[in-house]
């Protein structure tokens, strides 16, 4: 899905993910995927000059993969903020979005592309179907 030309790329991404997954997976998984895509697209809007270029959603039997592409080549700077130490850090209004992504996904990573980078997040549908922290037997 082309986000580069969208007037409201964040709204478009949320709507498309919700529309693609509703009725196919559990409502909690839909909500998790929408939150994850919100964080990834929001980060691309906030931290790159051009914002997100596109969103790719791949749905398989047991996993959803979200790819958010942007023109930023700063692959090494995309990481979670795990060094919260001061009171100012604890009160900061930003800087923890990738911690949410990490908590809600089976795996996420950043991959360089010929035009910038892609942040890829994989949501395990078994995890979503059976509740947080539980696995099917």
Image (cartoon, rainbow, N blue to C red):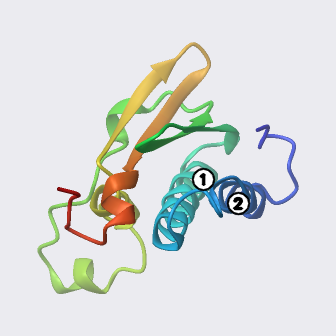
Rendered image quadrant of residue 136: bottom left
Q: Give 28 or 5, whichever is nearer the viewer.
A: 28
Q: Report the label total.
A: 2
85 relative to 134 in the view: left or right: left
Residue in the picture at 76% in, 38% down: 1
Rendered image quadrant of residue 38: bottom right
103 relative to 9 in the view: left or right: left
Residue in the picture at 14% in, 79% down: 86
Residue 10 circle label: 2
Residue 132, horizontal then vertical, whole percent? 27, 71
Badge 1 crowding class, 10 Å Cα cut-off, few under 14, some 14 to 19, many 20 or more, is many
Q: Are marks 1 and 2 in contact (CB under 8 Å)?
A: yes
Q: Of the residues under marks 1 and 2, which one precedes in the sequence?
A: 2
As helix, strand or loop, the secondary structure at mark 1 comes to helix
Q: Which residue is mark 1?
A: 41
Q: Give 71 or 37, whichever is nearer the viewer.
A: 37
């Amino acid at each position: 899905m082309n986000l580069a030309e969208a007037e409201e790329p964040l709204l478009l991404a949320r709507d498309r993910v919700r529309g693609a997954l509703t009725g196919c997976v559990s409502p909690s998984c839909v909500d998790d995927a929408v939150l994850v895509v919100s964080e990834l697209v929001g980060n691309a809007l906030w931290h790159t000059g051009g914002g997100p270029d596109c969103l790719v959603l791949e749905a398989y039997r047991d996993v959803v993969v979200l790819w958010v592409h942007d023109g930023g080549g700063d692959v090494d700077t995309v990481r979670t903020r795990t060094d919260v130490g001061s009171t100012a850090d604890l009160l900061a209004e930003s800087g923890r979005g990738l911690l949410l992504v990490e908590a809600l996904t089976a795996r996420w990573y950043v991959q360089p592309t010929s035009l910038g980078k892609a942040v890829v997040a994989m949501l395990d549908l078994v995890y979503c179907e059976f509740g947080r922290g539980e696995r099917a037997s």
